[in-house]
Amino acid sequence: KRANPAPLLALVSRPPPHRRPAPTQIDAHDAAPMSTGGASLVRRALEAVRRTPRWQKRLVVLTVGAGTLSYACQDNRVLQISDGTGGKKKVVILGTGWAGASFLRNIDTSLYDVHVVSPRNYFMFTPLLPSVTCGTVEARSIVEPIRNIVRKRGGAFRFWEAECYKIDPTSKKVHCKSGDGTNADANGEFVVDYDYLIVTVGAKPNTFNTPGVAENCHFLKEVEDAQKIRKSVMKCFERAALPNLTDEERKKNVHFVVIGGGPTGVEFAAELHDFVNEDLAKLYPDVKKYVNISVIEAGEHILTMFDKRITHFAEDKFKRTGIDLKTNFKVVKVSDKTITMSNPTTGEIAVPYGLAVWSTGIGTRPIIMDFMKQVGQGNRRVLATDEWLRVLGCDNVYALGDCATISQRKVMEDVDSIFRVADKDNSGTLSVKNIKNVLGDIYQRYPQVELYLKTNQMKGFHDLLKDKETEELNIEEFKKALAQVDSQVKMLPATAQVAAQEGAYLADCFNRMNTCEENPEGPLRIRGAGRHRFKPFRYRHLGQFAPLGGEQTAAQLPGDWVHVGHSTQWLWYSVYASKQFSWRTRMLVVTDWGRRFFFGRDSSSL
């Protein structure tokens, strides 16, 4: 027999145990860089990877790998321009924010003649704006051209880069103005008619009419705002590094003030703190000792929309890291040199500053204020819609996002009609069985009923009755049972999550409009006959994050799941990468994070 050569080859290829390969000689010139900068980078990378849970490593690898493959295999389709023929209904979208882009991304453009009017020709991923202010992420990494969104879906539409300044619901026209002045009158004005109007113009920063805010403070709503802040931060450091300045002048130049303790203000303060300590401290060692970051909040705590555990952790962390947190202070005036604020204990004090960022909430745009007066909503702060996102007081106009809010119908306003619908035999009383037959429709039409039952740990409608043995209810007993449920009516928050879900919901309704016209799927009409065409919009909260700096993020997810730490920061990376509108921006953002990790943030005044 022929012997098997494998064992013999293994013995031959195995090196003798007493022999060791001679060590490679490294020139001292070459070894020095590796022992300082290179070794430090490797150690940081290995330590970060070692601390990361295995499932999060796999998620990041899967996200980047799939994105690279998808981007490499992308199509080269040419954007189709809608010519307005074919007898299709014209849908006009005002705005390209979260709501408008989400609607445009999901609408079936083969069913409608879609036109978009917006002063910017791109969608912006707003949750990463604070990262742009310090160079953690580049501005172009978080924007996606609107034409790209439609082109990749193979749809046809028209886009005009202009601003709508008037809505005429009577004649179904919108009046727009372009800054280029290219029409015959050289004023850039034109009119667009519509069959359906989707208003998603967003909101503007709310200054609360505080003197000097608009002239002296930075806002953080647009990409241009983040770029201006980034330039201003570097100018403050360069001014503080000039010779012949007193210590007080240096302190003033690098005193950064954030007005507003909400998520945007807190995240910007944390980003700026990391930028100063991780990057600028090495470049401006003589200026670092003068830097001061202050957060001014009118309430008692910051991040009040989060769980109290996150609020307390964030406040403690800011104090530990040296961020000056001033709560119960209201800013009353801002000049070009000082910020004047008041406190019940200290009274008014004036603080010199180098840069101020105003992040205290949102206000109504002038076009929405004028439109509300036309439709009888002049006394409101934002545009009111029903549960199907239709603007109250006019036809075929829908409003989504920060410019509108859902005016939930109250149960006690319709309690007589609800009783009549449930009382099918017109006996004047309702049995438990009668109520159960319409309970599903009541839950859909009035979600506060189900929410009230869950909040009070009730199993069903029968628990609302004071007398549990009651089998028949008259109208008065029915009213008493439902008297408290309207206390659970709440306004939706003005967040990207809400706007994106509203846009996707409304697009789905438009896509199925003909089908649902013949086969309605909504709840019973309480004040009319038949059923509603669609189910009303229901917001599904998916959780929220609050980056706190130092590679630590607070997360509050459904089910009362609260966590703060380094592992949550990697979850934040994964979620925000996956939520990008395209694989192009997803790859750019992940690349920016990697660049910052290895090489730091760029300190150029660009």
Image (tube, grey):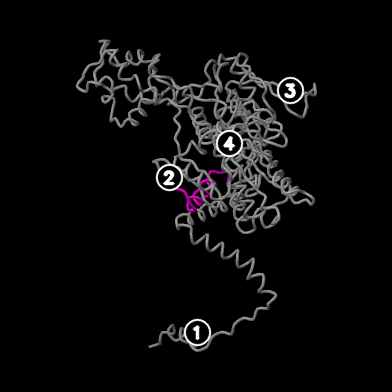
Name the amino acid, label 2. Val
The numbered mark, 3 or 4, whose residue comes first in the sequence reads 3
Foreground: disc 1 or disc 4: 4
> Split into 4 quadrants, where in the image is the N terminus?
bottom left
User: Please, which residue is most extreme toward the front here?
Assistant: 346
Mark 1 or mark 4, earlier in chain: 1
Q: Label 3 neighbourhood size at 10 Å, few (<14), some (14-19), many (20+)?
A: many
**Label 1 close to label 2 by CB (< 8 Å):** no
Q: Where residue 428 sits in the image (x, y, percent)?
A: 26, 10
Mark closest to the chain's N terminus, 3 or 1: 1
Q: To which quarter of the image does residue 429 belong?
A: top left
**Mark identifier at residue 13:** 1
Q: Secondary structure at mark 2?
A: strand
Q: Amino acid at mark 4?
A: Gly
| Mark 4 or 2, nearer chain start | 4
Q: The magenta stretch spans which residues?
A: 562-582
- How far apart marks 3 and 1 lie (CA) works out to 82 Å
Vertical position of residue 287 compared to residue 494: above or below? below
Residue type at the position of mark 1: Ser
Between label 3 and label 4, give the one nearer the viewer: 4
68 shown above or below 356: below
Between the residue at mark 3 and the residue at mark 4, the CA separation in whole angstroms equals 38 Å
Residue 199 percent coordinates (x, y): 59, 25
Residue 562 is tagged as 2
Say the numbered circle drawn on residue 260. 4
